[in-house]
Image (cartoon, rainbow, N blue to C red):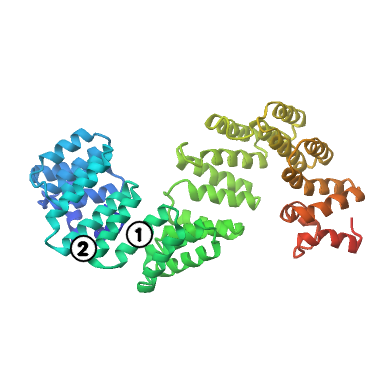
Amino acid sequence: MREEDFSFFEEEDFKENLARYEAMLNGGPSAYLEADELTDIAEYYLTQGDTDKANACIDYALTLHPDSIDPLIFKARQHMFSGNLAKAQKICDSIQEQNDREVIFLHAELLIRKRDINEALNYLTEQKKWFADDRKDLYAYLYDCACILEDYAYYEKALEWTEEAEKISGPNLKLMFLKAEIYSIQEKYEKAAEYLDKILDENPYSLKSWNMLADTFFMREMYDKAIEAAEFSLAIKEKGNPEALFTKANSVYHLGNFEKAHQLYSQYIDEFPKSDEYPYLFDGLCLNQMERYEDACSRLEAAEEFSNDCSPEQLQIYLQLSFSYSKVGKFQKALLYLDRARNYEPDGFDYEVLKGHVLLENGFIQEAMECFQKAKEESTDRERAYFLIAVSLFENNLYADALENFYELLEFCSVQTEINCTPYMAYCFYYAKDEVQYLKYLERSCATNPEGTKMVLGSLFPEALDPKEYYAYVTRHNRM
């Protein structure tokens, strides 16, 4: 069942049937319902994540209607989804009405899952004959075939069937949205946006179109436009609109407004607490940026709980937890999560450097230096290791040691890494009150790395001042 069909569950007839069925489960009178009505209830249970109740409902349907198509197809599809293609095929073949639309689609999906895509396409083409006499039926068949091909990631074939459907019906909102969906999945975001704009010209209250448009802007890093589209969506439906709220929060985060992003992620978590790890992780990132490390620990712990240790962001979750716990002085927990990160992805990050940073941040200077030395000797990316060690020393106010490491790095590093070093070196000389070297590196830094200069040295200058003007400001005001 596709997402657009979920609105059926809000209809009064369905609600009445569900109430009758559940009353029977709770000891009430037997509920005689038609096969399609019981199958709808089973589909509803699936959307609620209750597979056992869904299967029990189908078993009940088959006791009342043993040869009915809808519950048999449901049962076959459940076997198919669990990987038991043989059982699914046996049920499919047992259905008497083999030219029924849903039986045709089930058979085609089984062929696709058996990796017989060409046979599936030939089969679907052949079965068009059953719908050729009625343009409306043929259009619906072609549209559903396109949806199936999209579901199985045969996007170009899906577009071909969509075009064929369009020849019958002409352009319509349903086909335009399907095309937009396919182009968006293919990361052809501009093409997707063209169709979404056309849809919204005709139907400016299309919630799904505003949400997808917001996503296309977000994926193109057009964050202001993504926020605007998400806000249009939220104006249509303020409550119960997780897609728009999350896109808006993510866009605000990427614009660097961590306070506002935190408010939006918190709103999302309050409204949709049982979602997944992502809002908890991203809110934890916001809180870390805001230096609210205790709160970040709480959010990130929730992210770990929701991820079940198998998220694509698992390494990030562990590293952020290590970072946060180190900041609040719980270095043992910080090292615990660092070890979890290493076990999860042994070659994915600079373990010894990060361990040294945690130890250094918590006052274990000698132990930290031993980790840093080990990292220098063992790292497969010597340049990166030296740079991270120097930055760690810098962040822990060991400016003389940081400067020594930067000088070591400059002996063999690339031009780009040297550019990255200059703002840190300028600050080290500022701290050491070495005006000549400070001005030398400040001038280089302003010319070659204005963004890094603002990040490292911005606190020394007026906030509105362009970092390219820092050197001129110092020399003009004779300020060290």
Q: Residue at x 23, y 35 (%)?
A: 85
The answer to whether 91 appears left or right of 435 in the picture is left
- Determine whether 460 is above or below 368 in the image: below
Mark positioned earlier in the residue sequence (2 or 1)? 2
How crowded is the residue under tag 2: few (<14 C-alpha within 10 Å), some, or many (20+)?
few
Residue 205 visible (yes or no): yes
Disc 2: which residue? 12
Tell me the CA gap for discs 2 and 1: 32 Å
Disc 1: which residue? 179
Q: Position of residue 33 (x, y in %)?
A: 11, 52
Q: Position of residue 31 (x, y in %)?
A: 11, 51
Quadrant assignment, res 208: bottom left
Which residue is more in the foreground, 279 or 401?
A: 401
The answer to whether 66 appears left or right of 177 in the picture is left
The type of residue carrying mark 1 is Lys
Which residue is more in the foreground, 253 or 155?
A: 155
Question: In the rendered image, which quarter contains the C terminus?
Answer: bottom right
Marker disc for residue 159: none
Residue 6 visible (yes or no): no
Quadrant assignment, res 396: top right
Q: Residue at x 60, y 51 (%)?
A: 287
Q: Position of residue 153 (x, y in %)?
A: 35, 47
Which residue is more in the foreground, 178 or 313?
A: 178
The type of residue carrying mark 2 is Glu
Q: Residue at x 57, y 48 (%)?
A: 284
Q: Residue at x 20, y 33 (%)?
A: 86
